[in-house]
Amino acid sequence: MKVCVCLDAMTAQMPFDQAMQVAAVAGGVEFWDWRGRDLARLEDHARALDLPVVAFSGNTFDEPLVDASGRGRVLEHLARSLEVARQLDTRVLVAHVGYAAPDRSWGSQWEDAVGGLQKAGKMAEAVGVTLAVEPLNSALDHPGYFLETLPDACRLIDEVDQPSVRLLLDIYHMRIMHADLLERLPPALAVTAHVHAADVPGRGEPGSGAIDWTEIVRVLREHMLADRR
């Protein structure tokens, strides 16, 4: 397993040059939205440091996959994100399904998410990129988020049935939603492409809260790595 630093979550208060040096020590870098960034500068620093740009967001909450009427905007943003991924030699883009619409049925939004991810997955597969779908906690940080549990995320990926569509497992978000997260991890790791690590409570660095990281890492190594041998 390789470690990467998220510029927006971990080093947002640092000067850019210093943040990239920190990421280089870890071994990789990721960030959220590419829009508004100096991509040429980021690319130059990454190459100079031999630093892989591991992941960034392929779409945002403003382009929800749970709404087919806005699918054109989602796919347009994704197409531009795939161009940036080629520029930065990035192989993982985070896919956000978006917030639930209270005036529509859960089932119709589910169908839209499946259909949208199938189209997005084909676009990503054509250029060798994996879309990592991230469920988020709705209990604290993202009230009303549509994809809020690990079982639903795994079922969504199963129904999409695209090899380029996989799971982004955020330990912080999923531990908030599942007190029994350790028991839920093994089947999810079979479809996991990327992992985010932060502790609960507080979303601080691992070891600052109540999560048993020794067990988390053991399960990651036992199941996630085994599935890739």
Image (spheres, rainbow, N blue to C red):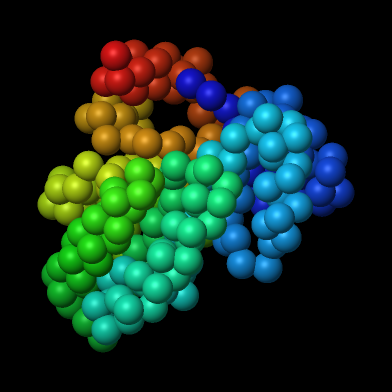
At which x and y percent is residue 43?
Answer: 68, 47
Q: Looking at the image, which residue is at 20% across and 59% down? A: 118
Compared with residue 106, is residue 30 higher up or lower down, i.e. above or below?
above
Where, by quadrant of the figure, is residue 44 drawn? top right
Q: Nearer the viewer, residue 184 or 87?
A: 87
Compared with residue 97, is residue 215 higher up or lower down, i.e. above or below?
above
Quadrant that contains the C terminus: top left
Marker count (numbered): 0
- Left or right: where 142 falls relative to 160: right
- Left or right: where 229 falls relative to 162: right
At which x and y percent is residue 89?
Answer: 53, 43
Where, by quadrant of the figure, is residue 201 drawn? top right
Q: Is residue 122 visible?
A: yes
Q: Nearer the viewer, residue 24 or 190?
A: 24
Q: Looking at the image, which residue is at 50% across and 50% down? A: 86
Q: Nearer the viewer, residue 44 or 2?
A: 44
Q: Is residue 151 visible?
A: no
Q: Looking at the image, which residue is at 47% across and 66% down? A: 80
- Left or right: where 61 falls relative to 181: right
Compared with residue 105, is residue 129 higher up or lower down, i.e. above or below?
above
At which x and y percent is residue 52?
Answer: 60, 35
At which x and y percent is residue 228?
Answer: 30, 20
